[in-house]
């Protein structure tokens, strides 16, 4: 890794940890602030090499799980936001990329629901009474939402990289 990549990785890691800390401490839209950390990670993946982004993802994940007061945001970052952006980089050029992305998100959602139902059944008492077919509209809306998030993330990263290129920033 070059010194420029190390410095940029450190800045992106610090911004991500700061965003996750702000989301866990400050009132407001926690998911929007956590999404910001996914955006800067996606920018790092596009601007530098794959290993820089993977290194930052793992460092931010460890720091968020060890030091932040809201551990659930660390889990969401690890599985949904940062995890999705990291997994997405491996399948970006693949022919079946959308299928793999959907399987990843459905698998993570199923894992979180199973853990929630297993370890805190008192929180999910009413959910157990709902039939599976009643969840289908919710699952469909979540799928459409993640497609919109994926397209928005790609678009904003492309625009940001184009602005940097117009201002003379070198990769």
Image: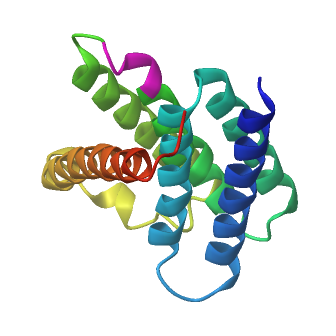
Q: Residue furthest front?
A: 168
Query: Please, what is the dominant secondary structure of the magenta stretch?
Result: helix
Which colour scheme appears in the figure?
rainbow
Q: Left or right? Give the position of 28 relative to 55.
A: left
Residue at 31 percent across and 51 percent down: it is 159
Picture quarter containing residue 69?
bottom right
| Residue 84 position (above or below residue 157) | above
Q: Left or right? Give the position of 161 relative to 27.
A: left
- Which span of residues is magenta-colored? 89-93
| Residue 95 position (above or below residue 60) | above
Q: Residue furthest top?
A: 95
| Residue 125 among those drawn in magenta | no
Of 58 and 132, the residue lying toward us:
58
Quadrant (top left, top right, bottom left, bottom right) of the C terminus? top right
User: Residue 123 appears at what percent x and percent y?
Assistant: 53, 68
Quadrant (top left, top right, bottom left, bottom right) of the N terminus? top right
């Amino acid at each position: 890794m070059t010194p420029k990549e190390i410095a940029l990785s450190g800045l992106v890691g610090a911004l991500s940890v700061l965003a996750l800390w702000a989301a866990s401490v400050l009132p407001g839209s926690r998911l929007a602030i956590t999404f910001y950390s996914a955006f800067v990670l996606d920018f790092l993946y596009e601007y530098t090499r794959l290993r820089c982004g993977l290194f930052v993802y793992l460092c931010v994940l460890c720091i968020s799980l060890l030091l932040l007061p809201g551990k659930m945001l660390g889990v969401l970052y690890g599985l949904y936001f940062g995890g999705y952006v990291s997994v997405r980089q491996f399948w970006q050029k693949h022919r079946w990329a959308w299928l793999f992305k959907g399987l990843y998100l459905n698998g993570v959602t199923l894992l979180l629901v199973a853990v929630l139902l297993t370890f805190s059944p008192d929180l999910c008492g009413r959910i157990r009474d709902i039939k599976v077919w009643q969840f289908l509209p919710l699952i469909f809306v979540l799928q459409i939402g993640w497609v919109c998030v994926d397209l928005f993330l790609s678009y904003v990263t492309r625009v940001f990289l184009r602005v940097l290129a117009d201002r003379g920033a070198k990769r």
